[in-house]
Image: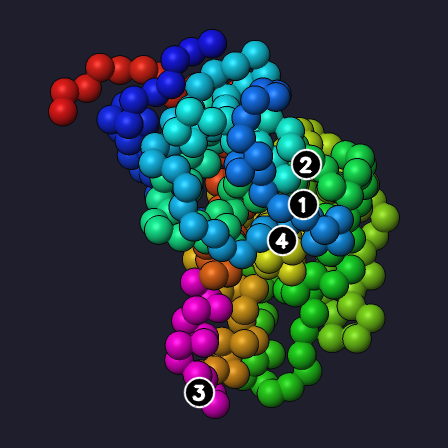
Amino acid sequence: ARPPRSSGAMWRSCLRLRDRGRRLLTWPPGDPTASASLRLPLQSPARAYAPPTERKRFYQNVSITQGEGGFEINLDHRKLKTPQAKLFTVPSEALAIAVATEWDSQHDTIKFYTMHLTTLCNTSLDNPTQRSKDQVIQAAVKFLDTDTICYRVEEPETLVELQKNEWDPIIEWAEKRYGVEIGSSTSIMGPSIPAKTREVLVSHLASYNMWALQGIEFVVAQLKSMVLTLGLIDLHLTVEQAVLLSRLEEEYQIQKWGNIEWAHDYELQELRARTAAGTLFVHLCSENTTVKHKLLQE
């Protein structure tokens, strides 16, 4: 096994990973002796992505090592485990560094609800709802039936025009990109999505591995939109654009009637954080990434 990476080397790798993440966000149109204290509380199958709340930080240093099954996270000299007590092992070094950064960034209190990459890894490793790849794909595609940008209002005229100007180009891009028909509707039943469209998108999603699919479904659930998620994963949209497009009607109402400033800002930042983490997770799981080792002068 590869020896634990030093804090300096891991930090430099984190900086490189951070730079890669920034480019993504701004892209234009098991060990039986491991301590039980490292095991997170079991997640409810009905809330596969719901992490526990908080606990006092119990470790000083975070490092990663490469084992037979992939890359592992070490908190001091103990190996991290999943809620179901499996060894926490991820398929790429870049993802391991990103997860290690989440743990290293915690202060006196570990705020699990801010550690979206760790939560997604736990879900991928434990698969608490015991779903197959096909079931995850079908769950993501089902969002087409209630896709945010496919539902349109009939009034007021200013909002009708806003939806048309902002959402239509995204639908047109997706239709051209995947050779499908999606459309939009003002009916409460939503648009009628052709069976061929579903087949094409199911086939497209099947090209992703199970880990990446967990991330895709997570992003779809945040944005309430399969179409916006496709644009985001394809780098046609940035995270900021996708989030604002998913909240178009809310932002319209806020501009018209005002809002509780702190609540709006908190909700917006949380949605951006979850969406960004899910998107990064998809990309880090879609390739076998190994961070190149270079000797850098301090």
Does the CB distance between marks 4 and 2 fall below 8 Å?
no
Please name the residue shown 47% across and 61% down the image.
Answer: 270
Instruction: Residue under label 4, please give it.
Output: 50
Question: Which one is in front in this view, the residue at disc 4 or the one at disc 1?
Answer: 1
Task: Describe the element under mark 1 as helix, strand or loop.
Answer: loop
Where residue 110 appears, x then y in whole percent?
44, 50
Figure quadrant of the C terminus: top left
In the image, taking residue 194 as reference, residue 105 lies left or right, namely left
- Amino acid under disc 1: Leu
Where residue 195 appears, x then y in whole percent?
85, 48
Q: CA distance from mark 4 to mark 2?
A: 14 Å
Q: CA distance from mark 1 to mark 3?
A: 41 Å
Q: CA distance from mark 4 to mark 3?
A: 31 Å
- Amino acid under disc 4: Ala
How busy is the neighbourhood of tag 2: few (under 14 within 10 Å), some, or many (20 plus)? some
Please name the residue shown 45% across and 75% down the image.
Answer: 264
Q: How is the image coloured?
A: rainbow
Question: Which one is in front in this view, the residue at disc 2 or the one at disc 3?
Answer: 2
Please name the residue shown 67% across and 73% down the image.
Answer: 152
Instruction: Residue under label 2, please give it.
Output: 84
- Amino acid under disc 2: Gln
Answer whether residue 216 is visible to the viewer in this image. Answer: no
Q: Earlier in the sequence, mark 4 or mark 1?
A: 1
Instruction: Residue under label 1, please give it.
Output: 42
Tag shown at residue 258: 3
Q: CA distance from mark 2 to mark 1?
A: 6 Å
- As drawn, 291 above or below 196: above
